[in-house]
Amino acid sequence: MDVTLRIRRYNPEADEAPHWETYTVPAEPTDRVLDLLHQVKWYQDGTLTFRRSCAHGVCGSDAMLINGRNRLACEYLVKDAGSTITVEAIRGMEIVKDLLVDMEPFWDSFKQVMPYLVNDDMPEDGKERRQLPADRDRYEDTSRCILCAACTTSCPVFWADQSYVGPAAIVNAHRFIVDTRDTAKQERLEIMADPDGVWRCRTTFNCVEACPRDIKITRAILEVTQEIGKAGIR
Amino acid sequence: MTLATLGRAAIPPTRVHEMDAVVVGAGGAGLYAALELKQELGPEARIGVISKLYPSRSHTGAAQGGVCAALGNTEEDHWEWHWFDTVKGGDYLVDQDAAEVMCRDAVETIINLEHLGLPFDRTPDGLINQRRFGGHTRNYGEGPVRRSCFSADRTGHSILQTLYQQCIRRDVAFFDEYQVLDLALPDGPGGRAAGVIALQLATTELHAFRARAVLFATGGYGKVFKVTSNAHTLTGDGMAIPYRRGLPLEDMEFFQFHPTGMYKLGFLLSEAMRGEGGFLVNDSGERFMERYAPTMKDLASRDVISRSIYLEVAAGRGIGGKDYVHLDVRHLGAEVLDKKLPDMSGFIRTYFGLEPLTDLVPIQPTAHYAMGGIPTDIDGRVLADEKGALVPGFYAAGEVACVSVHGANRLGTNSLLDILVFGRRAGKRMAADLADLPEPAVDAEAEATAAATVSGLLAGTDGERPAVIRAELQEVMFSKCGVYRTDRLLVECRDAVADLRARARHLKVDDRGCRYNTDLGEAIELGYLIDCAEATVESALARRESRGGHAREDYPNRDDAGWLKHTFASRGPKSGIMSLRYKPVTITKFEPKARTY
């Protein structure tokens, strides 16, 4: 079968404004949208630009707005996407070229929440720190984040104001806030309690719908607000 | 972000970065090395990590099963047992002194990762939990042992995230989305390494990174094969670059084909699906592994099962006569499929639209892992030849390197262990060596060559599309230098690769711009793939025996008298003449014997 691919293209080096281009590509129902983008890039127009790597939903490179929803291009199949597929860059970020956006603000927000375990006390026996399975389970869900930005760039609060830290950064803060091994909880909660932090969430649930890992993001956000309350931070 | 001037299609001048040490590649090996360098040398040390991806995209993150270390947390285990399993799994081509280091260091390395925050699964007492994995045994082969430490079914993801997080904490300087073009060898071939030249993808600017020590940790080259579990970005960059400069690549003929790749897609359905009781069937529904491996059946080693699938297909017993067989997991039940194998079940549903509870799953062997690579010692120092001379300032670790701890066939879970132990050891060694290494110097020739290469590719108008040549390369490597090889197939493959190399001199790059020119990037990667293919097929053609991942139909037996030795393949940078030299295998404890499962 042939599929019609409508791609919103924009190369600021050459174009005055974003514009839609239409391509016809041969496809199997089981092809990924990423395969179609490759068909265009490899055999029709090498200037089409996007990020990708693993091609099976674990590296997080290819989050795009496909048929009106944020998804990974490598996880969305033709049989589900239909015979006319629209693809554009994720929203709220500056388009650098075609489907590729400037990710630097996203990484800055991520780094802002101290996304690393802080604990410089080593167990005296030289063995691992102990952690009970129930405590380990508290951050199981949020440790699955692949930093694809599908959630943050589906958030209307973030679209309106990019100073909001965004759901992905909160998810990664949560992963350490509830880790019993960590010693920087207070600092991290204070970052989350900042005016640009967790309070700006309006629970529209777009992030939950967009997450390719099905992480319960709004639940993580709620738990962070609860931890802020428990810590007595105002 | 600096972006190139509007519409400019020329190469801006080279930009220079003075560093203490430079790491190329931001997977597990590169990140661990960078972290060690920072911890050993302190916050003032200028440690740069160059990667063509964002670090969290590296392919370490795709590893599923686990990482083995003889912690003995759930039952008795000893690192010496792990050592034996590694040597046997590698069909005795493993350097036993190196494998000893890996299996011994494994224990302390895994503990260190826990201290860094890795979310391991836990025992009821809160220790790191461990489970069984193919090929790992107690007491030198008596039976399976719980040795694999894991983080659900995404151990690689957790390793990558943890190391990246700690590198952020230690303020490692990241140069994301830079593609490496060359190694600086300021004293010419045979001399020291003193940095790299890289292309900033965002701007198409050339950057020279000058440093006293360089680590290559760029991963494998699975994209040389048509069906592979590897990411699009695994194009052998780090192997091809030293090879072009006349340095050798070791044991390139040994490539692991994992038996259960998803049909056509290539990415993996974990060995754990068979560990839980899944089995393979052919077109008539027969459990054919019972014929090939009567004892271990569907849990024989990866190379054995991949060859069996190939033979079934060759005999016309593939499904509908085609080039795949079925994995049957229907009897495992919903509890096992959804709780123990959720990601695998998800892959089957997402990509095939099949229901593992009721449907058979089409699988075929997929090119998975390069046992060979840049030869190094046990501290990541790169060997200049088979006699053991070193390249001062040049280090390699992970899949790009060949220590050799995997020999002719890598044991499951040992790839993660390799990147961790040897990435970390390389970082420590570099930190210790820095004071004695000379100040960096300019390799003007390499910088000029890199600029000329990029300009040349951007100027090409009449050539072929890189994708066309790449697809032919992948096809010919998969069909003629794949699971089974013969003299005739390999000669045909060598000729085809040479022909493709000639055709790749004229490439058509559509994109002439300077902004994220990934079209240019793919053209550069094609060149790397062709170099890796050449070294692989030449090494394979010469080795007239079957051992581990290298199976010759015309030489079906292992030949220890003639071939218990490592291949060192190199090509004269000026002459273009290939040479194959050999190095004895280091045997310290386990005498080679027949390998049965």
Image (cartoon, coloured by chain):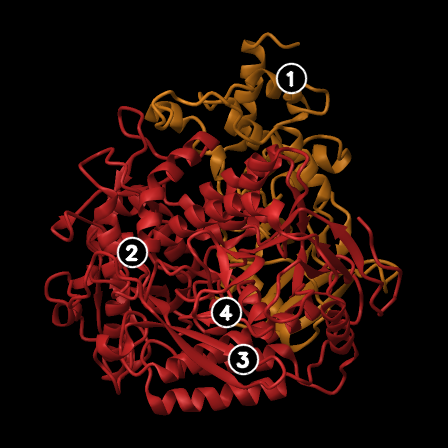
Query: On what subunit does the disc labeled 2 rest?
Result: B
The tag earlier along the polypeptide, 2 or 4, is: 4
Write down the colour of chain A.
orange
Q: Are marks 1 and 3 on the same chain?
A: no
Q: Residue at x 31, y 28 (%)?
A: B127
The Cα atoms of the two marked residues, 3 and 2, are separated by 37 Å
Q: State the image quarter where residue B110 is shown.
A: top left
Q: Nearer the viewer, mark 1 or mark 4?
A: 4
- Are circles 2 and 1 on residues that touch, CB within 8 Å? no
> Disc 3 marks which residue?
B571
> Disc 4 marks which residue?
B223
The Cα atoms of the two marked residues, 3 and 4, are separated by 22 Å
The Cα atoms of the two marked residues, 2 and 1, are separated by 44 Å
Chain displayed in red: B
| Residue B112 percent coordinates (x, y) | 42, 34
| Residue B483 percent coordinates (x, y) | 33, 76
- Mark drawn on residue B271: 2
Mark 3 surroundings: few (<14), some (14-19) or many (≥20) residues within 10 A: many
Residue B129 vs B265, above or below: the answer is above
